[in-house]
Image (spheres, grey):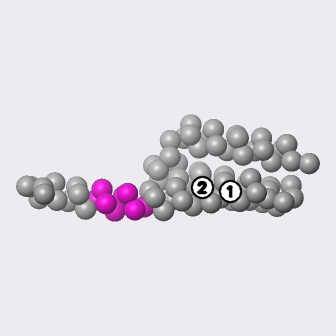
Amino acid sequence: MPNHKSAEERVRRNARDNDKNRHYKKLMKDSVKEVTSAKTKKQAEDNLKKAVSLLDKMVVKGILHRNTAAHQKANLAKRVQAMA
């Protein structure tokens, strides 16, 4: 147990931030799966647009590093372009 008030606040903040990060990372995984499991190229492009938007929001919120998001966006775009 924390011995100082600031440590108690830090424990509460860490728990809150952990929940928020887990929520956004789950959304990210779901959006990536939607892109990769799309049946048509048009559907994949629509899902890609949503996934890119979500990744950009996560960068702004500080959940993802910008290079990580750029790497994932590039890989997703490459997959969509490879679809027939």
| Residues shaded magenta | 13-20
Q: Position of residue 11 (x, y in %)?
A: 23, 57
Q: Which mark is residue 29?
A: 2
- Check residue 33 for magenta coloring: no
Mark 1: amino acid: Lys
Crowdedness near tag 1: few (<14), some (14–19) or many (≥20) residues, C-alpha within 10 Å: few
Q: Residue at x 70, y 41 (%)?
A: 75
Quarter of the image where one finds residue 18: bottom left
Quarter of the image where one finds residue 70: top right
Residues 30 and 66: in front is: 30
| Image height of 78 relative to 30, above or below | above
Crowdedness near tag 2: few (<14), some (14–19) or many (≥20) residues, C-alpha within 10 Å: few
Q: Which mark is residue 33?
A: 1
Considering the numbered disc 1 on the image, is that residue within a helix, a strand or a loop?
Answer: helix
Q: Residue at x 60, y 55 (%)?
A: 29
Number of marks in picture? 2
Mark 2: amino acid: Lys
Q: Is residue 41 left or right of residue 2?
A: right
Q: Position of residue 80 (x, y in %)?
A: 80, 48
Q: Position of residue 52 (x, y in %)?
A: 66, 52
Considering the numbered disc 2 on the image, is that residue within a helix, a strand or a loop?
Answer: helix
Inspect this view and state whether residue 70 appears.
Answer: yes
- Marks 2 and 1 sit apart, C-alpha to C-alpha, by 6 Å
- Magenta span: chief secondary structure: helix
For the N terminus, the image quarter is: bottom left
Inspect this view and state whether residue 6 appears.
Answer: no
Q: Residue at x 74, y 53 (%)?
A: 36
Q: Are marks 2 and 1 in contact (CB under 8 Å)?
A: yes
- Check residue 14 for magenta coloring: yes
| Image height of 19 relative to 77, above or below | below
Residues 2 and 77: in front is: 2
Q: Position of residue 14 (x, y in %)?
A: 30, 56
